[in-house]
Image (cartoon, grey):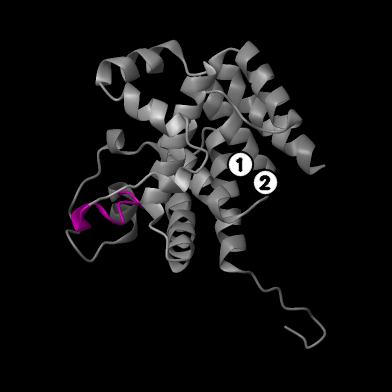
Amino acid sequence: MSNSEATVHLTKIAAAKRQLDTAIRLFFAHDDELSIHTLVAAAFRIIRDLIEKRGTDFEAEVLRAGLYAMAKQYRAGTLSENVSKDLKESGLLSLFETIADDDDPSRIWITRGKAESRGWPSGPANFLKHADRHPNALLAASDINNEDFLIGACIAYLELMPTSSPEIMAFIALWAVEHDHALDAHAPVRKLADRLASLKKDKRYRACAEWVRQMKN
C-alpha cells in the first residue's frame, strides 16, 4: 500500500455492527445458517465484552430489559393473548404488575450463579470456533436458533448505541410481527411492521431485504 493511500480504522463496536448487519442480510436471504451463527457470535462477543467493561452484567441487562418491556406491555394491554394467559398461569402476575408500576427498570435485580454467567455466545458458536477440543464432536442442526440469537444481539447492541442500522431495525420489526410483540419504534419501522403483518410468512423476509436496500439508497 502506498503512503498516499488512507488507512481505515474500525472501532470494535463498528466491527460488531458490520458483522451483525451482514448476519441479518444473510438471514433475510435464507442463506447458510452456520455462517449466520458464526457472524452473530463474533458480534455478540464484542458487544458483551464492551457492556461488561462498563461494569454491567451483560445477561442481567438483557433479562432486565425484557422483563420491563413485557411488564409495560401487559399494563398497556398490548401483550399477546397467549403470553398474557401464560403469565397469569405462571403465578408471576403480581410481580409483573409491580414492575410495570415502576419507572426505573434498574431496580429490577437479576441474580445468577457463576455457572450461569457468560451464557452467550452459544454452544453451537463455540463448536464452530474450536477444533482443538473434541475434534470429532457433532453438532445437531436443531441446536442452532439464529432467530433468538439475532434478537438477543440486536437488543444488546441497542444497549450500547443510541442509533441503529436498517438491518437491525428491519429484523426487530420482523421479530415483533412473528412473535405478536408490540413494537415501540419510530414511524418507518412501524410502517414496515404493519406491512409485514399483512404479508404471508414466506414473503416477509424478502420484504425486509428490500426495505433495507431502500433505506440505504
The one nearer the camera, 147 or 72, is: 72
SS majority, magenta: loop
Residue under the point 61% across and 41% down: 168
Is residue 119 magenta-colored? Answer: yes
Residue under the point 67% across and 18% down: 194
Residue 1 drawn at (x, y percent): 72, 83
Q: Tag 1, which secondary structure?
A: helix
Task: Give the total of numbered labels.
Answer: 2
Mark carried by residue 89: none
Residue 188 lies left or right of residue 63; in this view the side is right
Residue 91 drawn at (x, y percent): 25, 21
Asked where in the image residue 169 lies, by quadrant, the reply is top right
The quadrant of the rendering that contains the C terminus is top right
Residue 211 lies left or right of residue 27; in this view the side is right
The one nearer the camera, 63 or 207, is: 63
Residue 185 drawn at (x, y percent): 66, 33
Residue 171 drawn at (x, y percent): 58, 35
Is residue 29 shown to the viewer in this render?
A: no
Residue extent of the magenta highlight: 113-122
Is residue 62 shown to the viewer in this render?
A: yes
Q: Amino acid at mark 1?
A: Ile
Q: Look at mark 1 in the image and give the residue it sits on.
A: 168
